[in-house]
Image (spheres, rainbow, N blue to C red):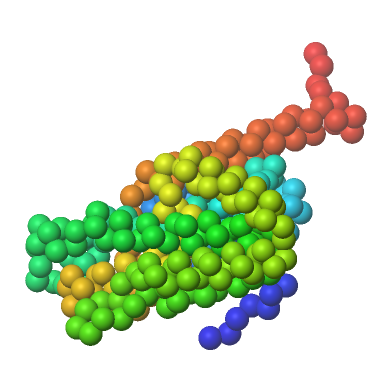
Amino acid sequence: MPKLPERALSSQAVLLSPLQDIDVFVEDSHSKEFYNTLMSRVLDGLVRFFSVIPLGGRDAVEKRSENDNGPRASLYLVDGDLDWVAGEHTSCNHRLYIHQCYCIENYLFCVEAMKSVIHENSGVMSINEIEDALNWEEFRKSLEALIPLFVEFAVAQALGTGIKTVRRGYQAVISHVRGAQPRIDEGKIIAIISDIKNGILARCSELEYESKKSAINARVESLDDRLRIVSGKDFLLPMQNFEAHRVASQRMTTESLMLRLAKHCDLSQFSAIRERCVFLMFENQFRFTSEAIAQCHSPEQPPVTS
């Protein structure tokens, strides 16, 4: 299918303006259907919404948000990434919303959504059978071994070491057992953490390392859900797919799993995004009203007097 050139991506807002009250700009151009499904649920009953506008990357989203002083209500969504994990990604731009988790896929780590998706994918298992087979708490606990790894990733990122971190992917931390689904291998995680630490200490002092790691650990411990620091896209989602296959013996593509989870995930996670949209709509209406009043009372058009 024909694609818009990069320079024309943001101009889609003009075409969509009659169909929606707020423009929502996102990073990933390859997940538009997922974003549309998710955001349609999030914004339902709040504003008219038709489609997100993918800009092809984080830098493009942040740059456009900084230059956006237009009259339209606009929301720019970006992932938290390792900068958020380290507590270093903040913004005073109220149109830019940084997900309070590693990435948007973290919102899909939801037990009710998993049960619903497995139920649909199986077609023969009851919800009660799925709940018994799923054993969500045990599955979740196995993934908590990834938390120290992502703390180490965040330390390497915050200290500007250039060491390979999240791009290692989930394959680097799993073991395959004959006749069973892949599982998290804590031994591999410990080895990677040690390797990254040695790489950091080859570039930074031990005092810098310990100080930064202590600060990041304290931040992570303060979170309501520490698994929010683990990449949903690159680690949690693949493990959810393995778990769904274990329970129902059916395989799904990553794209299919994402889309299905987006239809069922807990919407209470998105209250901050909804509040931001309300604020942007109010700001837009206030600006429109103020400009209309100013125009009516401008020197060129003085107010009518009796």
User: Where 184 sits versus 91, above or below?
Assistant: below
Residue 21 picture location, percent across and down: 55, 49
* Residue 278 can be seen, yes or no: yes
**Residue with the most extreme right position:** 299
Residue that appears at 38% across and 67% down: 186
Residue 195 picture location, percent across and down: 56, 71
**Residue with the most extreme front position:** 206
Lateral position of residue 265 relative to residue 282, left or right: left
* Residue 56 can be seen, yes or no: no
Give the image quarter of residue 170.
Answer: bottom left
Lateral position of residue 210 relative to residue 63, left or right: left
Residue nearer the viewer, 19 or 173: 173
Lateral position of residue 125 relative to residue 263, left or right: left
Residue 4 picture location, percent across and down: 64, 77
Residue nearer the viewer, 13 or 167: 167
Residue 194 picture location, percent across and down: 53, 67
Residue that appears at 65% across and 43% down: 94
Residue that appears at 56% across and 62% down: 153
**Residue with the most extreme top position:** 306
Q: The C terminus lies in which quarter of the figure?
A: top right
Give the image quarter of residue 3.
Answer: bottom right
Residue nearer the viewer, 69 or 131: 131
Residue that appears at 82% across and 27% down: 297
Q: Tell how many labels.
A: 0
